[in-house]
Amino acid sequence: AQKITQTQPGMFVQEKEAVTLDCTYDTSDPSYGLFWYKQPSSGEMIFLIYQGSYDQQNATEGRYSLNFQKARKSANLVISASQLGDSAMYFCAMDNNAGNMLTFGGGTRLMVKP
Amino acid sequence: NAGVTQTPKFQVLKTGQSMTLQCAQDMNHNSMYWYRQDPGMGLRLIYYSASEGTTDKGEVPNGYNVSRLNKREFSLRLESAAPSQTSVYFCASTRPLRGETQYFGPGTRLLVL
C-alpha cells in the first residue's frame, strides 16, 4: 500500500522568502509519480508540479521546484519568493504503478506574512 | 471548454435521505474519480472508473454507489445519508497517462444533519 506523509500541519513564511514543504512517501511500486497541488480557501484543487520516479532532474515550474531525493523517499516542494497569494493548503500526492490512482497526504497549511 | 463540472455546489440532507451527486467532463478523458475531503485532511478516493463501463472501489467506498453513465458522466449516490458522510466531494478526470494530472471539479459541500 502507498502512503504519503506531510509532517508540517502549518507553516509561516515571510513574503518574498523561500519556503520548503516536506513530503515523504512509501511505496513498493518500481515506477511512480509525485504531484503537488494547491488548495486556496476557495476550495479548488490546482496542479502545481510533477516528478516521475525515473526523471533524472528535479522538476521546476516557475517559482515551484521539487527537491526529489529518491533514496530518502522524499519529494519536498520549494516555493521561491513567496507571495501573499501563496497562502493556501498544499497537498502532496503519489500515483500508483499504473499511473491511474492518486494517494494524498494530509496537507500543509502555508501562511505568507506581509 | 468547462473542464469538470459538479452539481450541486452545496446540499443539506437529513439522516437517511438519499441523493446523487453529478459530475461531467468535456475533455474526453477515460478515467474519472470521486474523492471526499474531510475538514483539515487530504482527499480520499471513494470510487473510480478507469474507463467507460467499469467502476472500482477506492479507499472509502462504504455507503456509496457510483454509475459511469457514459464517457462524460460519473455520478455518486448516497442511498441513506449519515452524519459521517458530511464532507466536501470532489470529482476528477484524467486520460490517464504517466505524468498527467487529474483535473478536479469545484467540489460539492454536503452537510448531513
Image (cartoon, grey):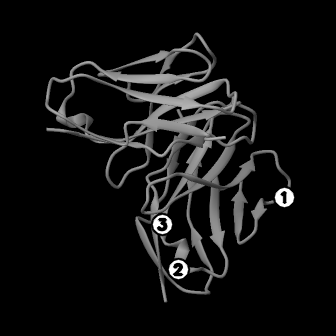
Q: Which mark is residue A57?
A: 1
How crowded pointer 1 is (Cα within 10 Å; few <14, some 14-19, many 20+) is rated as few
> In the image, is B91 to the left or to the right of A96?
left
Identify which residue is drawn at 49% across, 50% down. A105
Whether residues under marks 1 and 3 lie with C-beta atoms below 8 angstroms apart, the answer is no
> In the image, is B63 to the left or to the right of A49?
left
How crowded pointer 3 is (Cα within 10 Å; few <14, some 14-19, many 20+) is rated as many
Count of number-bearing discs: 3
- Nearer mark to the viewer, of 1 and 2: 2
Amino acid type shown at disc 2:
Leu
* Residue B76 placement: quadrant: top left
Identify which residue is drawn at 79% across, 60% down. A58
In percent of width and height, residue B21 lies at: 38, 29
| Residue tagged 3 | A88
Residue B8 appears anywhere in the view: yes
Q: Residue furthest bottom?
A: A114
Whether residues under marks 3 and 2 lie with C-beta atoms below 8 angstroms apart, the answer is no
Cα gap from disc 1 to disc 2, whole angstroms = 29 Å
| Residue tagged 2 | A84
Do dots 1 and 2 share one subunit? Answer: yes
Label 3 chain ID: A
Disc 1 element: loop
